[in-house]
Image (cartoon, grey):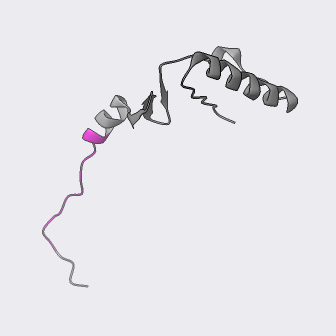
């Protein structure tokens, strides 16, 4: 498993959902790498998207990368075969 995102509208609901997720992970004997855990974030970047509240958009780094992609070049010559 690569990542778990938990979204909640209140901090109380978030704490309850986190308890449920942690209980399930514990029951499955699934260890977490604490150095990769982030809690109560207002915004996350996940799979190339910036996610916050009710908005998800392509991350700025992805937009910049797409701006540098060149389109196909047409030589004007047609191969008759």
**Furthest-left residue in this view:** 76
Q: Is residue 49 above or below residue 16?
A: below
Residue 4, given in percent of the width and then of the height, sits at: 64, 31
Residue 70 point in image, percent of width and height: 24, 48
In the image, 5: left or right of 53? right
**Majority SS type along the magenta span:** loop
Q: Is residue 50 left or right of residue 40?
A: left
Question: Residue 14: where, in percent of width, then height?
Answer: 63, 21
Residue 54 sits in which quadrant? top left
- The reply to whether residue 31 is visible in this rendering is yes
Residue 22 shown in magenta: no
Task: Give the residue drawn at x 63%, y 32%.
Answer: 3
Which residue occupies 30% across, 41% down? Answer: 66
In this rendered view, identify the residue nearer to me: 64 or 54: 54
Name the quadrant of the N terminus.
top right
The answer to which image quadrant residue 20 occupies is top right
Q: Residue at x 60, y 30 (%)?
A: 5
Residue that appears at 29% across and 33% down: 64
12 lies left or right of 57: right
Residue 76: in magenta span: yes
Frontmost residue, 10 versus 48: 10
Q: Magenta part of the protein: which range?
A: 66-77
Image position of 23 (left or right of 35): right
Residue 57: quarter of image: top left
Which sits in the foreground, 32 or 42?
42
User: Height in image: 33 above or below 75?
Assistant: above
Q: Would residue 39 be seen by someone viewing this image from the given angle?
A: no
């Amino acid at each position: 498993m690569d990542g778990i995102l938990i979204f909640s509208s209140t901090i109380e609901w978030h704490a309850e959902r986190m308890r449920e997720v942690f209980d399930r992970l514990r029951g499955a004997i699934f260890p977490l790498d604490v150095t990769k855990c982030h809690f109560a974030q207002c915004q996350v970047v996940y799979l190339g998207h910036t996610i916050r509240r009710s908005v998800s958009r392509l991350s700025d780094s992805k937009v910049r990368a797409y701006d540098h992609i060149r389109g196909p070049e047409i030589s004007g010559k047609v191969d008759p075969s």
